[in-house]
Amino acid sequence: MKRAAALVAAVALLPALAPADAGAQELVRPKSLDEKPRFHRLTGRQVLRIADRLEEVREERAEHPGSTREVFTKGPTLWQVSYYAKTPKGEPREEIAQVIVSDFNGGVVEVWTDFYVAWTMARGYEGAFGKSVNATYVWIPLLVIFVIPFLRPRRPLSLIHLDLAVLCAFSVSIAYFNAAEIETSVPIVAPLLAYLLARMLWVGVRGEGRGPPPPLLLPTHWLAVGVVFLIGFRVGLTFVDSNVIDVGYAGVIGADRLADGDPLYGGWPGDNEHGDTYGPLAYVPYIPFEQLMPWSGTWDDLPAAHGAAVAFDLLTLAGVWLLGHRVGGGQLGAGMAWAWAAFPFTLYSLNSSANDSLVALLLVATLLVATSAPARGVAAAVAGLTKLAPLGLVPALATHGLRGLPWRARLGRLALFAVPFTVVVGVTFALTVDDVGTFWDRTIAFQADRGAPFSIWGLYDLDVLQRIAQVLAVLIALGVALVPRGRDERVRLAALCAAVILALQLVVTYWFYLYIVWFFPLVMLALLGRDRARA
């Protein structure tokens, strides 16, 4: 009997030993610190003594004189002790340290200080983003598969090899992120974004020559068959082992509110209070999925979010194939589709059921209609009203195809872009936004004040340098509009748009790996494609 009881206790302890589960339990304040809560072995007083002895806690409390502490049960097997800095009356409390203690043996499971307290996503909980995509036996083979068609063995010093290495190097950063080593993961990202920014400006301003795209290492039909198998793997993994982060959850909530005629901005549920931080068109594509698989009102499995993520991913894959085919024929189309299907960060977004592939889809669609000024205006408005950052592409898109035209014709083309753009923005706001002030507060104002440790600006005190960098990013967004381009120069347009997206991502405080898919299709087209020579 004793052995059986010990076995049961050991099984009960397993959740307490798993950091991934530690953040998912409900906190309950015990009625008394000196009595054991039901089914618990420890009292609150004992847990406080355990936490107070920790060196990290003592150091943090020494830096915050007058700090207070509270103890909570965290499910049936864990305790949490939270330490709060002394704050003026009426202001919200600032949690400065957090300790998770096992009720079974009084062992310390987790200790968090600094930004790790507020940002649970920085703690490296297993499977928090993308589930098993992060496993080395999935991620590394995908990286190898991704680069193979674009290698040039006869030219080992080709610049494309460095470009591919930079794209793959984001994997080093995310490996440190998954290990909760934010001080190492963050500094890796900025140089990679800066390199790609410089490379895209080089391609967009100087151009990379004319003629057919360089040959790929694998035949087109091999790539096509490989893409089919990769699609099956991606979709299968999504249905077997994926999750829905707050981004996908926000899409389902917003779709439900739009379908019911409720205000889109303000008054969101507490488990996703700031899910209304995106443009109104970020929620519209979720409506058919939410209507087919209605939201239950809680953060459950959210099948609508899974379905939408799969649809966004497959449509983007089809879009990059079509874009590559139009620019460089079947080989480039197959290469672009292969790149999207094999690049692990696109699967990372899919398996997180995020909406970032929707941004990529809309930017690819914008390039597909780039030869038409009115269609470009519509596409620019739709993309910009989804996640707002693509609004930075408006100058480049508005001035595309003006090279060689007289001034009167240029003004006419600008009007053909501006009128549809304005109409789409106006109609969208009229149908989805009840109060512009609330929209501003919940989206742009919230994002502008949002701090996060996932960029060099949030991790370090670099306010002055960040302001300078932001001014440079605005100048890049305006400056690329002055680069002369013909109407058929989609590769150059892709490079310039990628440069703007990269510049914006490089200067914002809140950056995350899901954003890589925004610029990835544009970067690949710029690296692999060639614009046709003018007649």
Image (cartoon, grey):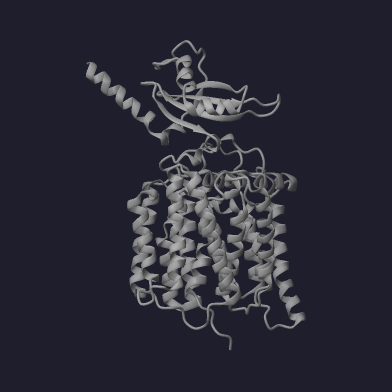
Front-most of residues 156 and 147: 156
Q: State whether residue 22 is above or below residue 380.
A: above
The count of marks equals 0
Which quadrant would the N terminus be assigned to in this image? Answer: top left
> Residue at horizontal 37%, vertical 65%?
227
Q: Is residue 251 visible?
A: yes
Can you give x and y, in whole percent of width and height, for residue 469 in the image? 65, 57
Can you give x and y, in whole percent of width and height, for residue 138 in the image? 35, 53
Q: State whether residue 530 is above or below residue 377.
A: below
> Residue at horizontal 68%, vertical 78%?
402
Q: State whether residue 357 is above or below residue 250.
A: below
Q: Residue furthest right?
A: 408
Q: Quadrant of residue 273?
A: top right
Q: Residue furthest bottom?
A: 535
Give left or right: position of 177 versus 141. right
Q: Quadrant of residue 243?
A: top left
Give left or right: position of 19 versus 305. left
Which quadrant would the C terminus be assigned to in this image? Answer: bottom right
Give left or right: position of 388 versus 29. right
Can you give x and y, in whole percent of width and height, for residue 245 in the image? 50, 44
Q: Is residue 369 visible?
A: no
> Residue at horizontal 46%, vertical 29%?
25
Q: State whether residue 244 is above or below residue 234.
A: above
Q: Quadrant of residue 119?
A: top right
Front-most of residues 466 and 476: 466
Can you give x and y, in whole percent of width and height, for residue 66 in the image? 62, 22
Give left or right: position of 382 versus 248. right
Q: Residue furthest top?
A: 34
